[in-house]
Amino acid sequence: MNDLIKRIIVSFLALLIFAFSLRYTVVFILLLFLLSFFLQREYFLILKKRGIKSFFKLTLMLNFFILGISVYFAHNPKIFSNSIFFYLLLYSLCFEIICIYQVVKFGTENILENITTSAMALIYITTPAVVGYFIYVNCNLFYLMYPLVLVWITDTMAYFLGCTFGKKKIAPLISPNKTYIGTFGSIIITTIIFLLIKLFWKSMPFSFFEILLFTSLLTAVGHIGDFTESALKRYVGIKDSGNFLPGHGGFLDRFDSLLFVIPIYTILLKIGGIF
């Protein structure tokens, strides 16, 4: 079975699991916690290979703490009305805890590298999980499935076009297999696919202009997330973040685009008055 078929099967199964979890709040919450665990684990294993001190256990506890608080406030929004102010304080508290852990356990040894990489885990992995849950609570299921399907189509098209027609590499030092045709072709084709869906599905919540804007922008953002994770792997000197998912590698390899797409998507929903 070639890698393209494996990628399609794994991505489709992941979509089915997400779609099933959306029907049951408890299952969706458990899935978010489980995914954040695997993503954090792979992230810190990558750092460990570079010789950076692993704050995995501490950061994972802070990740679960933020997720737990977020789930509670998502269902009790009146308890703390200014959510942005609250989350600034929450992340500041977590950052201070990381700093205290560094100073007490390691002193000044690699202080900037250890603290920044640990804090990055909360921004990179925890934040998309938090805002994803708020979308789940406040919007109908279409708004949560849209970015998942978008990333799946973009990833499949980029791989297919790159392998079939791609010759010129877009960033060979960062991601040797990515091509100009695969990258930009996937943006165009994914946008066209969603415009065609809108053409036949008149009641789709987004207008034609929103589909054109959202899809083209988010597919580009997804590629940035992909390149970012690839750069992190090249920095360490590995090809994949793991080997759990056939055709993809690890969980970070599968969700790297989505981790970038979800926060930007949430901003677009906010600007549009949808969320």
Image: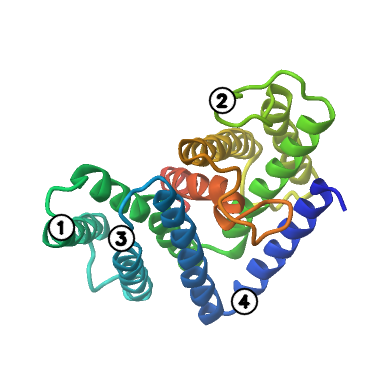
Q: Which residue is mark 2?
A: 173
Which of the two marks, 3 or 4, is nearer to us in this view? 3
Q: Earlier in the sequence, mark 4 or mark 2?
A: 4
Tell me the kind of residue under disc 4. Arg
**Residue 159 place in picture, x, y as percent:** 74, 38
Tell me the kind of residue under disc 2. Leu
Image quarter where the C terminus lies is bottom left
Q: Which residue is mark 1?
A: 96
Which of the two marks, 1 or 4, is nearer to us in this view? 1
Tell me the kind of residue under disc 3. Phe
Residue that protrudes farthest toward the right in the picture = 1
* Disc number for residue 23: 4
Residue at the (46%, 71%) spot, across then down: 33
Mark 1, Cα crowd under 10 Å, few <14 / some 14-19 / many 20+, is some
- Residue 187 vs 135, above or below: the answer is above
Q: Earlier in the sequence, mark 3 or mark 4?
A: 4
| Rendering quarter of residue 107 | bottom left
- Residue 273 vs 126, above or below: the answer is above
Viewer-closest of 158 and 269: 158
The CA distance from mark 1 to mark 2 is 36 Å
Mark 2, Cα crowd under 10 Å, few <14 / some 14-19 / many 20+, is few
Q: Which residue is mark 3?
A: 55
- Would you say the residues marked 1 and 2 are in contact, meaning their CB atoms lie under 8 Å apart? no
Which of the two marks, 1 or 2, is nearer to us in this view? 2
* Disc number for residue 135: none
Would residue 15 be found to the left or right of residue 264 on screen? Answer: right
Q: Secondary structure at mark 4?
A: loop
